[in-house]
Amino acid sequence: MPMLGTVDAEPYAWPFDGGVDPRRTALVCIDWQVDFCGPGGYVDTMGYDIGLTRVGLPATAAMLAHARAAGMFVIHTREGHPPDLSDLPANKRWRSAQIGAEIGGVGPCGRILVQGEPGWEIVPEVAPLPGEVVIDKPGKGAFYATNLDLVLRTNEITHIILTGITTDVCVHTTMREANDRGYECLILSDCTVATDAGNHTAALHMVTMQGGVFGCVGDAASVIEGTTWEGPA
């Protein structure tokens, strides 16, 4: 069976409790959706450089393949709202309208951040396989108004590795929420992205403060290299 050994990370070798069974570890892939990293999606419509939000896809694809081979529990998240926008807060809708990409409005990839539309789907490079858990969330954090915590505890997950968009918003919010619930977290610097390079760097730096206030920062290669194979996978 594979074993995930300690990972070279900052500010400490992750996890704090030494090696961990990959089956107790979840790889959480946050919001790798067309709306956030595809042409014509929400981020593109707002005028941000999707080159910045796509840069983490190769490392995430490699990490995802490794996680599947090692037997980690894989979870994908999607941010979006039902077609009637019944769970869309008025201030969130208003803010998006001010920057020319109103949530629920029609864009090149269908209605922006609306469930079932092309822009809401996860990009092919890191798409879920049949049977993998997909969490649909209405907000930034993946725990808010979802069953994520129940899914993790039901499957005896104690450790979480995070990838996704954006480092400073949805990924950071989810990591903070997970930390408060007692999960040992690792955020991967090369598998997380932001619409602003400075925000990405700052968000990672925040994690390392106070001895690892929310967990640790590492990269995909360190996780892959830290996995040992004691027998058939």
Image (cartoon, helix red, strand yellow):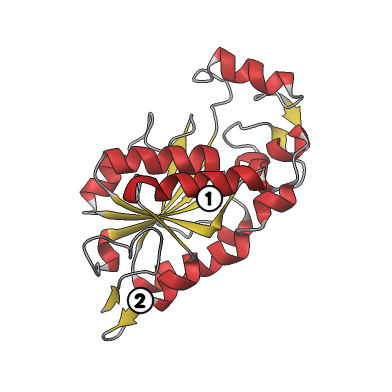
Looking at the image, is 22 positioned above or below residue 147?
below
Residue 142, image x and y in percent?
A: 42, 38
Residue 69, image x and y in percent?
A: 40, 74
Q: Which mark is residue 164?
A: 1
Looking at the image, is 195 positioned above or below residue 224?
above
Looking at the image, is 13 positioned above or below residue 224?
above
Q: Are marks 1 and 2 in contact (CB under 8 Å)?
A: no
Per the image, the residue denoted by label 2 is 227
In this view, the residue in front, 88 or 46, is 46
Label 1 SS: strand
At a point 70% along the width and 38% down the height, the residue shown is 43
Amino acid type of the residue tagged 2 in the rendering: Thr
Label 2 SS: strand
Residue furthest out toward the front:
210
Residue 107, image x and y in percent?
A: 76, 32
In this view, the residue in front, 195 or 138, is 195
Residue 147, image x and y in percent?
A: 32, 37
Looking at the image, is 149 positioned above or below residue 60?
above
- Structural distance between the alpha carbons of marks 1 and 2: 21 Å
Mark 1 closeness class: few <14, some 14–19, many ≥20 residues within 10 Å:
many
Ranked by sequence position, the earlier of labels 1 and 2 is 1
Amino acid type of the residue tagged 1 in the rendering: Gly
At a point 69% along the width and 36% down the height, the residue shown is 42
